[in-house]
């Protein structure tokens, strides 16, 4: 499978293994196509998880990771891509319906927008909250004081 | 590859069916304080009379930022935090986390520790299913099973209390094995529990399985097809009740589940009744696993060699286990320091809850309650 | 003065109900008695339901207030009375205020015709059963008003549900009642009666309870009524109107304090009322078991000691539990209280052995015992059944009970005609 | 039972009934109107009682107050409350109303003055106790045909309602 993909996409992707787990690092431009191919041709029909990691020091600040699983092959794979802050990704809701909330959570926590998502809004934090808490520059004690004061009528939630 | 069985084509929210009598559709806010939403789930229902046209879940009322906390604690310090996610199945959460970090550290817990882990985790599965059964039956209006299940769950909690001092958020496992050796009489008490508990499952089933009203309330309610389950990423008993024979304990065995014999119970129709039957059968299977594990409990060390200060090599690992609610995954990124660079939890309840809308569409208000109950969500895990 | 005493005492020799005799004084006395008895019954029912349900569910139920929680209902009543009475801001004040009153009024008014004995009823109307059904159907108005006036979605849905439910089950209920009334006409004159007392008299004359009449027709009609009456009173498994897991508390979600307690009172007295109808129509009302088969003075005397024996049994249970009380000084007051309660029950039992008293109270005793059986059934249902869904409930009412009721009615009429031909060729 | 203070109760119930009737047409809130109608119907049932017609009174309570009016309320609540409260009174048909009222009033006067030979002036000799049986014999004997016609009419109405409500049968 890897060889086939490699043949098709060449230098845009790189297949790696760590601790016995396969993952591939894919160029942002190839993401829509590769996810499509994995779902439709390689039978990765179950989108386990979508998440992101923030590396503020890098130029391409975010790793976005799709964890996929194939029932037919009993195999798990991770697809990883790097994007800069403010860049958007194509939504994979048309591919896996279950990606809906997972993408919303990534948006909520990291501020990464997904194009074509049916309902791109915050999910865990309230609407109108400022900041994306899982970014590394968001302190652990930090909160949107203004929101708390207006909506909850208390000085601070802490 | 679009599945023709999938019902997702009905999913366009924009064109609801034309309501009867031109009565305005009713929008009802269920929760966050509502007796049947199992915590602080808020569901906004759009109703036509009693028929559900669509619904939207509003979650996050219990968000505590567990993932953020994980980035600011060392690997050992974060271990108790994961218990607070799915607080009715804390042991499973701990197992998943410990195994993931062990993968990063490239260590493996010794066999005795593995066995004890399996025993405690399966006991926890039973406890979690008992709590589900009680509350689910209560939602449907049968108040009595709740007290029976809680009476029996107490026996499990007593074993936990004796083992590690806590009943709910147990923090039972450590990275690399166990901290405590089992107490004297542990094996005997577990065996006693098994003999005590077997007839109790029959008792629950006697109360409900053939109860006419129960069958009427659960059969053909909240049907979800296997294709839909997979599309939504729904796992656990819900997926199995739709007829997919998939259990991580068999598919990708972790701990030492490969040493034990057990079956994966599956349903046919993917309705609430099948999910009920699957969970009941799972309790019996858990009893089987525990029995094998406790009979073959090996002697030996309970802790692998792990450094006092854990500094896993830089890298990232995704590992998942079959929690009582479905696939519970941990994705941990290490940068070589004492603290994880990023901890991501893949909560089964969160993903399963997405399917609520498609399961409830076209059903009645009373069915929404039944479906919320049958999804077996824990809001602590949904919101983290 | 003498005239007044004569007026009062003249009734004692009559064999009519005070209403039928036109005696205002005794009518008032009976109204007071029924009201008091009903209040006591509701309080007792509250305690019993919690205790019995608790024991079904492997727990103890109220244990703190008074010995074995005996004073719990009183404590609850005080709590409810002291609670702040909240009215939602956007509620329709007048309707909100009227709703519990109507429900309570309907629930209590039906007892005007309930025959606790051949003379122990406030009055005997010749449309007795019709009156009971009619007035108890008014309580649905109160429920609908409560749900609407609260100006909130959950109560509104609860009210809609309960109105649809009660109106539909009234139909099946009515058909079952009619088949029982048909049976009353199986006498020489061929005319039946709607009077509650007349119905029991007819069962006495025909020598069997209507539940066994034309077996199994009477039983089926009784079954239909027994199902419909649970639905009529919004109790489990038909408690959709107040399904707490779906609608929080249904139509009385927004009510609190005293007003809420009125709904509570009405629910329980409505339960007693419909059970009284069932007892009167099918289970021989005040008649003691086997009044025709085991007749004669010795049997009468044996049956007349039952009330006293029952109360002595209660007293014995009290004393037994007094002995079992923990011997801790903190429990002394509770132990004394329980023993005192036992003494009171025992004294009542002894008084009931006095022939003059037992003769007059017997009917009431048998009637209450039968009703108490129904009350136990209500609690039992609640402990064992899950709740029906709304469409299933409607299906059951319209597609099962209604055709069954119609069938039973037609069959009863047919069988009655056949028998009449045999009797009066 | 000897009647007590008959005129007093007659005027009392008549007044309640009239007040209820007036409230029905003056209240803006349809739910209030329906409740006022129930009051009027209950007062009417009391008047039936005073006419020694307990069966009719009982049926009046069961059917109208307990059944039909509940369905009325049901429908009113089903149709959005907020909207129906805000809605202006739409039936400002003074002319038709006046004509109907005049016709009805004329009828009353005509009956009162000329109807003495149609309606018996003396009280009916039917005893209270036999009331129900008498109604039954009349309904199923003398007026059998009209009774069946009426039930047929109702059946047609039911079928019509089902056809209207269900798009597909």
Image (cartoon, coloured by chain):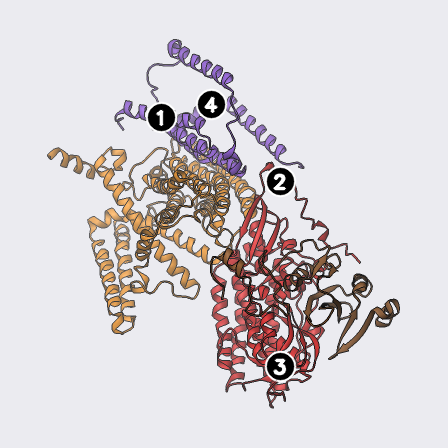
Chain colours: A brown, B red, C orange, D purple
Residue D156 to residue A50: above or below:
above
Front label number (4 vs 3):
3
Q: Are marks 4 and 3 on the same chain?
A: no
Residue A76 to residue C133: above or below:
below
Label drawn at residue B338: 3
Label drawn at residue D141: 4
Could you give the CA–CA distance between mark 2 and mark 1, rounded to whole angstroms? Answer: 43 Å
Could you give the CA–CA distance between mark 4 and mark 3, rounded to whole angstroms? Answer: 99 Å
Could you give the CA–CA distance between mark 1 and mark 3, rounded to whole angstroms? Answer: 90 Å
Q: Is residue C187 left or right of residue B256?
A: left
Q: Are marks 2 and 1 on the same chain?
A: no
Label drawn at residue B68: none
- Residue at 54% in and 78% down: B171
Q: In which quarter of the image is the N terminus of chain B?
A: bottom right
Give coordinates of residue B335: x percent, y percent: 68, 78
Q: Do labels 2 and 4 share a chain?
A: no
Provide the secondary structure element on which disc 4 rests: helix
Which residue was labeled with disc 2?
Answer: B19
Front label number (3 vs 2):
3
Q: Which chain carries label 3?
A: B
Which residue was labeled with disc 1?
Answer: D47
């Amino acid at each position: 499978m890897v060889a086939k993909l490699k043949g098709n996409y060449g230098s845009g992707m790189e297949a790696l293994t760590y601790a016995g787990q396969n993952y591939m690092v894919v160029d942002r431009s190839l993401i829509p196509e590769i996810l499509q191919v994995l779902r439709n041709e390689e039978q990765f029909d179950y989108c386990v998880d979508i998440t992101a990691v923030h590396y503020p020091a890098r130029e391409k600040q975010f790793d976005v990771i799709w964890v996929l699983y194939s029932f037919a092959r009993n195999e798990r794979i991770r697809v990883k891509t790097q994007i800069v802050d403010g860049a958007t990704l194509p939504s994979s809701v048309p591919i896996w319906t279950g990606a809906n909330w997972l993408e919303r959570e990534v948006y909520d926590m990291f501020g990464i927008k997904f194009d074509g998502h049916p309902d791109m809004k915050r999910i865990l934090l309230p609407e109108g909250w400022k900041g994306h808490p899982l970014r590394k520059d968001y302190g652990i004690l930090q909160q949107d004081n203004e929101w708390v004061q207006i909506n909850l009528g208390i000085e601070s939630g802490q | 590859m679009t599945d023709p069985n999938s019902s997702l084509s009905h999913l366009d929210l924009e064109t609801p069916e034309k309501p009867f009598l031109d009565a305005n559709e009713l929008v009802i806010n269920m929760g966050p304080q509502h007796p049947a939403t199992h915590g602080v789930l808020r569901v906004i229902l759009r109703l036509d009379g009693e028929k559900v046209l669509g619904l939207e879940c509003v979650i996050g009322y219990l968000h505590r930022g567990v993932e953020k906390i994980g980035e600011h604690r060392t690997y050992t310090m974060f271990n108790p935090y994961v218990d607070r996610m799915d607080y009715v199945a804390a042991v499973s959460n701990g197992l998943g986390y410990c195994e993931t970090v062990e993968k990063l550290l490239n260590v493996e817990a010794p066999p005795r520790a593995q066995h004890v882990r399996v025993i405690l985790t399966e006991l926890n599965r039973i406890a979690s299913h008992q709590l589900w059964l009680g509350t689910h039956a209560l939602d449907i209006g049968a108040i009595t099973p709740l007290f029976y299940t809680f009476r029996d769950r107490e026996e499990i909690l007593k074993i936990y209390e004796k083992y590690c001092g806590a009943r709910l958020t147990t923090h039972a496992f450590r990275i690399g094995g166990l901290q405590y050796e089992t107490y004297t009489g542990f094996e005997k008490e577990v065996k006693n529990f098994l003999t005590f508990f077997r007839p109790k499952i029959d008792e629950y089933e006697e109360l409900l399985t053939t109860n006419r009203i129960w069958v009427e309330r659960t059969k053909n309610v909240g049907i979800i097809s296997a294709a839909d389950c997979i599309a939504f990423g729904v796992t656990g008993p819900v997926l199995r009740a739709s007829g997919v024979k998939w259990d991580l304990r068999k598919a990708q065995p972790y701990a030492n589940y490969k040493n034990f014999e057990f079956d994966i119970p599956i349903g046919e129709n993917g309705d609430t009744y099948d999910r009920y039957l699957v969970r009941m059968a799972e309790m019996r299977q858990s009893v089987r696993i525990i029995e094998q594990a406790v009979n073959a409990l090996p002697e030996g060390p309970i802790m692998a060699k792990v450094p006092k200060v854990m500094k896993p090599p830089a890298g990232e690992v995704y590992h998942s286990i079959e929690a009582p609610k479905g696939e519970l995954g941990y994705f941990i990124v290490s940068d070589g320091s004492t603290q994880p660079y990023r901890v991501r939890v893949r909560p089964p309840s969160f993903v399963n809850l997405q399917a609520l809308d498609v399961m409830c569409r076209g059903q009645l208000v009373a069915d929404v309650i039944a479906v919320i109950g049958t999804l077996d969500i824990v809001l602590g895990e949904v919101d983290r | 003065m003498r005239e007044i005493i004569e007026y009062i005492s003249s009734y004692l020799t009559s064999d009519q109900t005070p209403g039928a005799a036109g005696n205002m004084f005794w009518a008032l006395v009976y109204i007071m008695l029924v009201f008091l008895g009903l209040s006591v019954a509701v309080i007792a029912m509250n305690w019993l339901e919690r205790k019995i349900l608790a024991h079904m569910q492997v727990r103890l139920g109220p244990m703190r207030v008074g010995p074995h929680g005996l004073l719990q209902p009183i404590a609850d009543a005080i709590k409810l009375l002291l609670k702040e009475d909240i009215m939602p801001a956007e509620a329709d004040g007048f309707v909100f205020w009227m709703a519990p009153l109507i429900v309570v009024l309907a629930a209590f008014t039906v007892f005007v015709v309930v025959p606790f004995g051949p003379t122990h009823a406030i009055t005997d109307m010749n449309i007795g059963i019709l009156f009971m059904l009619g007035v108890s159907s008014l309580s649905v108005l109160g429920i609908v008003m409560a749900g609407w006036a609260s100006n909130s979605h959950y109560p509104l849905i609860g009210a809609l549900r309960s109105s649809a439910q009660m109106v539909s089950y009234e139909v099946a209920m009515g058909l079952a009642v009619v088949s029982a009334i048909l049976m009353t006409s199986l006498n020489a004159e061929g005319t039946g009666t709607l009077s509650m007392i007349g119905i029991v008299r007819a069962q006495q004359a025909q020598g069997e309870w209507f539940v066994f009449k034309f077996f199994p027709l009477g039983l089926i009609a009784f079954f239909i009524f027994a199902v419909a009456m649970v639905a009529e009173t919004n109790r489990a498994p038909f408690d959709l109107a107040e399904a707490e897991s779906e609608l929080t508390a249904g139509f009385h979600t927004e009510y609190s304090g005293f007003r809420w307690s009125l709904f509570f009172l009405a629910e329980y007295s409505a339960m007693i009322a419909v059970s009284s109808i069932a007892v009167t129509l099918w289970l021989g009302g005040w008649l003691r078991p086997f009044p025709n088969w085991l007749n004669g003075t010795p049997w009468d005397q044996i049956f007349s000691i039952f009330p006293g024996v029952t109360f002595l049994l209660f007293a014995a249970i009290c004393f037994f539990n007094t002995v079992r009380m923990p011997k801790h000084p903190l429990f002394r007051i509770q132990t004394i209280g329980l023993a005192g309660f036992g003494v009171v029950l025992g004294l009542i039992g002894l008084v009931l052995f006095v022939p003059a008293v037992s003769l007059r109270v017997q009917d009431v005793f048998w009637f209450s015992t039968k009703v108490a059986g129904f009350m136990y059934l209500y609690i039992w249902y609640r402990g064992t059944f899950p709740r029906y869904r709304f469409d299933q409930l409607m299906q059951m009412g319209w597609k099962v009970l209604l055709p069954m009721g119609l069938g039973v009615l037609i069959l009863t009429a047919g069988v009655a005609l056949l028998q009449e031909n045999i009797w009066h060729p | 039972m000897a009647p007590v203070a008959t005129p007093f109760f007659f005027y009392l119930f008549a007044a309640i009934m009239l007040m209820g009737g007036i409230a029905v047409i003056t209240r803006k809130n349809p739910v209030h109107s329906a409740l006022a109608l129930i009051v009027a119907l209950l007062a009417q049932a009391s008047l039936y009682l005073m006419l020694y017609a307990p069966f009719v009174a009982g049926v009046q309570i069961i059917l109208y107050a307990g059944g039909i009016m509940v369905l009325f309320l049901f429908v009113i609540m089903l149709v959005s409350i907020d909207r129906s409260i805000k809605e202006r009174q739409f039936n400002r048909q003074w002319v038709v109303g006046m004509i109907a009222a005049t016709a009805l009033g004329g009828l009353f006067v005509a009956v009162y003055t000329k109807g003495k030979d149609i309606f018996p002036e003396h009280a009916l000799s039917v005893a209270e106790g036999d009331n129900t049986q008498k109604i039954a014999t009349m309904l199923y004997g003398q007026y059998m045909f009209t009774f069946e016609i009426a039930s047929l009419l109702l059946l047609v109405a039911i079928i019509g309602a089902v056809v209207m409500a269900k798009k597909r049968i």
